Image (tube, grey):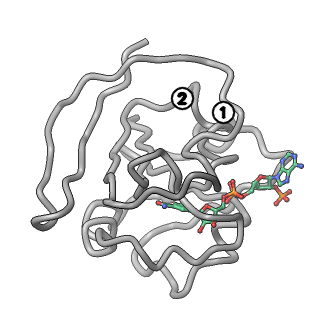
Amino acid sequence: MDVILIAAVTADGFIARHSHEVVEWSQDISLFKEQTMGYPVIMGSNTFANLQQELKGREIIVVHRNDEPVAILDSLSTEKCFIAGGGRTNTKFADHLTHLFLTPHPLVFGKGIQLFYNLETEFGLELERFYTVNENIVQYQYKVLR
Ligand SMILES: NC(=O)c1ccc[n+]([C@@H]2O[C@H](COP(=O)([O-])OP(=O)(O)OC[C@H]3O[C@@H](n4cnc5c(N)ncnc54)[C@H](OP(=O)(O)O)[C@@H]3O)[C@@H](O)[C@H]2O)c1
């Protein structure tokens, strides 16, 4: 199964200013909807609490601190699923990621919630394709190399 991390990031690698920020600066919401429609979307409890609207047409799996990523992924039978943040949840699933869909935004926060919280592993990426969202924004679709 493809396990795809999907995130809007600042130019300096942040996904939010703080854990309870509602991310209103993202310009790729409609792309997120299009790409995740019909597939399970896995997110942490902080991210879920910040959702402004129901994500219709997708199974939402809310992750808590004692949840095991393998058990969650093994329970799925779809060809792909999406890891939709936040930083702690991205790190929890880091060892299982097959792809990263990243949309850098023309912003610098300097501090905040990083794409990965305290990640202790390294991996390489290969650009598979990119998608132009608008004149300011491109989504980069990377394959994870292990
Ligand atoms: N830019 C983007 O694309 C994007 C995407 C997604 C999210 N975000 C933003 O990211 C932010 C949330 O990120 P986040 O990393 O704070 O939260 P998160 O990953 O959404 O949720 C926190 C997770 O960490 C667990 N946790 C909390 N405290 C812990 C601790 N002390 N030790 C171990 N586990 C702990 C929680 O479990 P419990 O439920 O048991 O507490 C939960 O599973 C929000 O502002 C959200 O809007 C941005």
The percent position of residue 43, horizontal first and vertical second, equals: 60, 58
Q: Nearer the viewer, residue 64 or 91?
A: 91
Alpha carbon separation for disc pair 1 and 2: 8 Å
Q: Nearer the viewer, residue 77 or 61?
A: 61
Ligand 1 quarter of the rendering: bottom right
Q: Quadrant of residue 33?
A: bottom left
Q: Residue at x 68, y 64 (%)?
A: 18
Horizontal arrangement in the rendering, residue 140 relative to residue 144 (left or right): left
Where does label 2 land, which residue?
Answer: 96
Q: Nearer the viewer, mark 1 or mark 2?
A: 2
The percent position of residue 96, horizontal first and vertical second, equals: 54, 29
The percent position of residue 137, horizontal first and vertical second, equals: 21, 60
Horizontal arrangement in the rendering, residue 22 relative to residue 28 (left or right): right
Q: Amino acid at mark 1?
A: Val
Q: Residue at x 56, y 52 (%)?
A: 110
Q: Nearer the viewer, residue 54 or 20?
A: 20
Say if disc 2 is inside 8 Å of ligand 1. Answer: no
Judged from the image, the secondary structure of the residue bearing numbered disc 2 is helix
Q: Residue at x 79, y 55 (%)?
A: 64
Q: Are marks 1 and 2 in contact (CB under 8 Å)?
A: yes
Q: Residues within 10 Å of mark 1 (few under 14, many from 20)?
A: few
- Toward the top, the furthest residue is 146
Q: Quadrant of the N terminus?
A: top left
Q: Residue at x 64, y 37 (%)?
A: 91
- Toward the right, the furthest residue is 66
Judged from the image, the secondary structure of the residue bearing numbered disc 1 is helix
Where does label 1 land, which residue?
Answer: 70
Q: Residues within 10 Å of mark 2 (few under 14, many from 20)?
A: some
Q: Amino acid at mark 2?
A: His
Up-down relation of residue 68 to residue 107 (above or below)? above
